[in-house]
Image (spheres, coloured by chain):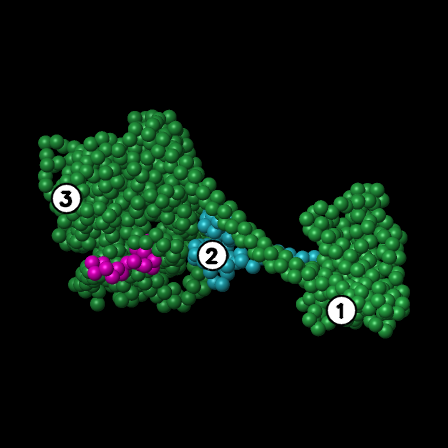
Amino acid sequence: MLQPAIILGTAFGYLCLLFAIAYWGDKRADRGRSVVNNPYIYALSIAVYCTAWTFYGSVGRAASSGIDFLTIYLGPTLVFVLGWFLLRKILRISKANRITTIADFISARYGKSQLLGGLVTVIAVVGIVPYISLQLKGVSTSFNVLIHYPAIAMPSAVSTVPLFQDTALYVALVLAAFSILFGTRHIDASEHHEGMVAAIAFESVVKLVAFLSVGAFVVFGLHGGFGPLFARAMEAPTLAPLLTASPASVFGNWMTLMILSMAAIVCLPRQWQVTVVENTDEKHLDKAVWLFPLYLLLINVFVLPIALAGLMEFPNGQADSDTFVLAVPMAARAEGVALFAFIGGLSAATGMVIVETVALSTMMSNDLVMPVLLRLKWLRLAERTDLSRLLLGIRRGSIVGVLLLSYLYFRLIGESYALVTIGLVSFAAAAQFAPAIIGGIFWRGGNRWGALSGLAAGFLMWGYTLLLPSFVKSGWLVESILTQGPAGLWLLRPQSLFGLAGLDPLSHALFWTMLVNVGVYVGVSLLTHQSAMERIQATAFVDVFRRAESQRQFWRGTATVSDLESLLGRFIGATRTRQAFVEYAERRGLNPGKMREADAELVNYAERLLAGAIGTASARVMIASVAKGDVVGLDEVMKILDEASQIIEYSRQLEQKSRELEVATGELRAANERLKELDRMKDDFISTVSHELRTPLTSIRSFSEILFDNPGLDLEQRREFLGVIVKESERLTRLINQILDLAKMEAGRMDWQIAELKLKDVVADALAAASGIFAERGIHPEVKVPDDLPLVEYDRDRLVQVIVNLLSNAAKFCDRERGWVGVEAASDGDAVRVSVADNGPGVPAADQPRIFERFQQAGNTMTDKPQGTGLGLAICRQIVERFGGRIWVDNRSGRGAVFSFLIPIRRAAQAAQ
Amino acid sequence: MQAGLRGERLVALFILAAVAFHPPILNLFAVGTTVLGWPFLYLYVFAAWAVVIALTALITGRAKEPSPERGGDAKPAPEREG
């Protein structure tokens, strides 16, 4: 079944499907119904991280060294745990500045430096092109393995295949066509390539499903499950070490691989492209931070089982472990599975190649070719009216260039050592960007010279410690460079530089590259000064979350609108420019036809538009060519930044103030409510007082009138009437005294005679004062006041008044027939509690809170005859609370009420005790 | 406040995961036994990996709502009765 025609047909059909999906994705995007605008597609597109190197190479690595293939996927998982900080910040910065590539990002951060952008591009191309070749090789190898079916023949050197029969060439050409069609649709590289992303996401699904199918087939179809497979492997003496991972050998460069993969997931140009540039909504990151690691976990579950199965199937190395994914199903005569595995590997390779090529071509055109062309005066580019076609041409040319370069690399170097190890070597090259990026977004002090020299030093060290040895091992340079050092300089041996021994070559290289990269970056940044533009950009990047509008007005110069428009028109096309300017005018409420002089904001707007097409550094240069004036000087920048930080400070203070105001408003509202309540109470009070005063007055008056009108009344009757008058006058006096007392206390004008008191004496005085009323009703109060109560500091008369009041209340309300009143005092922590109990009807729970209000009495005041002035308890409360005490009422279990109050003991009194 | 707490949780998780996926801890599991038919080391790495992913999902997903788990315990203590 696996004839070359069928394999080729399937592969071709698959690629056609990719074109169709990308086309469909773009059409949907044009109609505004995006298919990629959701976190799932976003996470799948990030899975372009898993290349053919993952698909075939992980198994190979697992077969040779066991568990350490997982580091390549655990590192990104760790980075995505922090994605909410790191990636979100990069996303926000990139969107604000219309960043198109990683080179653009670094050059924009360090003062829009063209030199830096160019250096990053060179490093990326040198480091990544071999990695693309590796993908082409993967496709070619897997195809060659598959067409020999049913034999498991390992392809000899690929270069023996005639050029025009080499599948890799055709794949490269098809992918170039794809990248050109779907990767360079817009002149504005910061816009999303939705069709491309849709196709990449689809490829991620295909490669995952393919790999899981192969895994499931091998584990469950061939070995009957994980258990039996592992058990069989444990028995083989050669395989057991892979499972138990003897720590010394396998964990040796564990940390190196973790660090490299952590750097790679951010710094590889294709990861930057899908994670940052193609991100449609920052919120998608929230889900992607766990979806993408989940994808990595799933695609790795079967890696080790396939490796073990392969090693058991081919114990004598008949098949290269890198081809186990294909060879194991082939040996089992499972043609369909093998074909599906081939398609999976194809999808892993093509996805990577497409995105990487688009990213690299954007970098090459924006940061390498355009700046050079614009500088060559004799080309008179600046005078050309339409540069957008040229720009797209350069980008498309770069795509073809990158792919042909990769193919050439693959044809020329082929099976050599240099290509096989290039995956990690590429990671190490990309890792060189990490210090400049991480430093750039968290450290304001990093500057252009620091970044330039750090990157250059790291790159040179990378070339010396990693690339050079791989050339030696491929046989292009003499072996003695490694063993004796270049020209016999022993200390300069590339794999044990300055005598550093004991590390594996990768760890050795990572150590030295990072040492010089970070060291030079930080050191030079500290020793040199930032220009104004660098300072502006540094602040805009580091403080991206603190500034609502990151595009601050640092541009002082002006330009005419027509100059700007014609400049932009040359790069992004006249129609689009016109449209963008009209949008700008509408947003600002201006008349687009009447704009003559462009203000600073419009100049900035134009620069950002241009940056999306040709990169920030070139945009800066182009805008400077039409706008008069320059960026503001360093002093002014500092002033503006200071102003900005002052404004931030002011706004923080304002927020503080407004919060305080809110609190104050709340308090005022409460106070107002209280005042209204008091006002109402005052009215009530006055009407109640008048009413209370009128009652005794009325009876005094009527009895007086009777006496006045009837002089002939007998003595007995006269005495009786006079007695009533006296009693009512007393009541009136008492009422008025109480009102005066209350008013005095409420106004705080009461004179308090403070003295140390023994509570027992006070209670005795009160009982004596109330003895009359008790005798009247035949009650014998039950008194329980211990002798050893602590002294209290209080106004004696007032305290007596409180107790008398409670006693007379109790006497008044207790049971008519068998009245009982109890007085009790006890020490209660740092207070003394006095309670007076009776066996009367008690106080209804509803009345308990308000019984201490003035003129409030329990029960129905309309029907019952009031039994007091209604001021007694209010006065009691005033007295008790004056000294921080508390008074309340409970109902006794059984029958009756208990009025209690607490008087705090003063420390002085305690000490005196 | 909430965002700050989410950030701290993620940093803590990062440190935890970084420790869990490095040799001193891995060596503890690099013994020759199998658990549930899987080599102990592999089972551990995949299980720990799954836990890290689940926690990341939990932390980043939850903080969108205004943190329901911190609502109920701020009530003042009931006033003391004499």
User: Within the image, what quadrant is residue A836 found in?
Assistant: bottom right
- Report the quarter where the N terminus of chain A lies: bottom left
Is A32 rendered above or below residue A865? above
Mark 3 neighbour class, 10 Å CA radius: few under 14, some 14 to 19, many 20 or more:
many
The picture quadrant where one finds residue A888 is bottom right
- Per the model, the C-alpha gap separating discs 2 and 3 is 48 Å
Q: Secondary structure at mark 3?
A: helix
Q: Which mark is residue A842?
A: 1
* A299 or A788, nearer to the observer: A788
The residue type indicated by label 3 comes to: Gly
Give the residue type that dot 2 points to.
Pro
Circle on res. B66: 2
Q: Give the numbered dot on residue B41.
A: none
Depth check: give the residue in front, A856 or A96: A856
Q: Are marks 1 and 3 on the same chain?
A: yes
Say what secondary structure mark 2 lies in.
loop
Which residue is at 36% across, 44% downward?
Answer: A548
Are both tags, 2 and 1, on one chain?
no
The boundaries of the magenta stretch are: A29-47
Which one is closest to the eye, mark 1 or mark 3?
1
Chain where mark 1 sits: A
Q: In this structure image, what is the colour of chain B?
A: cyan
Q: Horizontal and vertical percent for residue A74? A: 41, 51
Magenta run includes residue A406: no
**Residue placed most toward the observer, A249 or A518:** A518
Q: Which mark is residue A569?
A: 3
Q: Chain of mark 3?
A: A
